[in-house]
Amino acid sequence: MTNELLTQLHCLNGLLLLGLPVAAASWLLVQWRRQRQPGAAGRVMVFIVQIALIFQVFLGIVQVQNRERRPLLHYELALLALLLLVGVAWVEPQQPGRRSLILALVLLAAAVLLVVTFFLPAS
């Protein structure tokens, strides 16, 4: 792959990642208000966000290997968002609907990190 194609793919996936966590968190907050577990749809949405973020981090690592410049803290914040999203898989609260709230809050935190990461100026 050329560097230009990698950069375009990284930017396109980054734009997708600005909306995906918020959409999934919105769905999960509705489930929480109804005192329901996330269900299959909620798990699939979280999984899609996780896969998109893993792909984004992979593209970023490839770009670093190609010696492209990166903004200060860009990859560190993306890795933190990835750790949040992967780590939430081990959370198992006892109350019905609490998992929906926890997943929604983690997705919103990851979305904030991704927005900050996306708009960081180049160093």
Image: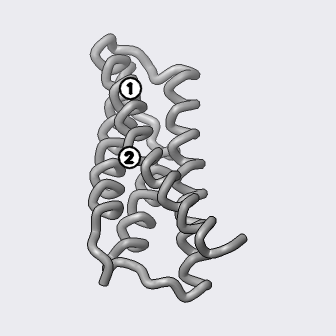
Residue 18, how many percent across, how many down? 38, 46
- Residue in the image at 45% along x and 60% along y: 83
Residue 35 placement, left or right of 1: left
Residue 20, how many percent across, how many down? 44, 38
- Position of 123 relative to 52 (above/below): below
Q: Residue lying furthest top in this view?
A: 34
User: Mark 2: few, some, or many residues within 10 Å (few <14, many ≥20)?
Assistant: some
The label on residue 18 is: 2
- 1 and 2 marks in contact (CB < 8 Å): no
Tell me the element at label 2: helix
Q: Earlier in the sequence, mark 1 or mark 2?
A: 2
Residue 67, how many percent across, how many down? 55, 88
Number of numbered discs visible in the structure rendering: 2
Q: CA distance from mark 1 to mark 2?
A: 17 Å
- Position of 52 relative to 92 (above/below): below
Q: Residue lying furthest front in this view?
A: 4
Q: Which residue is mark 1?
A: 28
- Residue in the image at 40% along x and 58% along y: 81
| Picture quadrant of residue 27 | top left
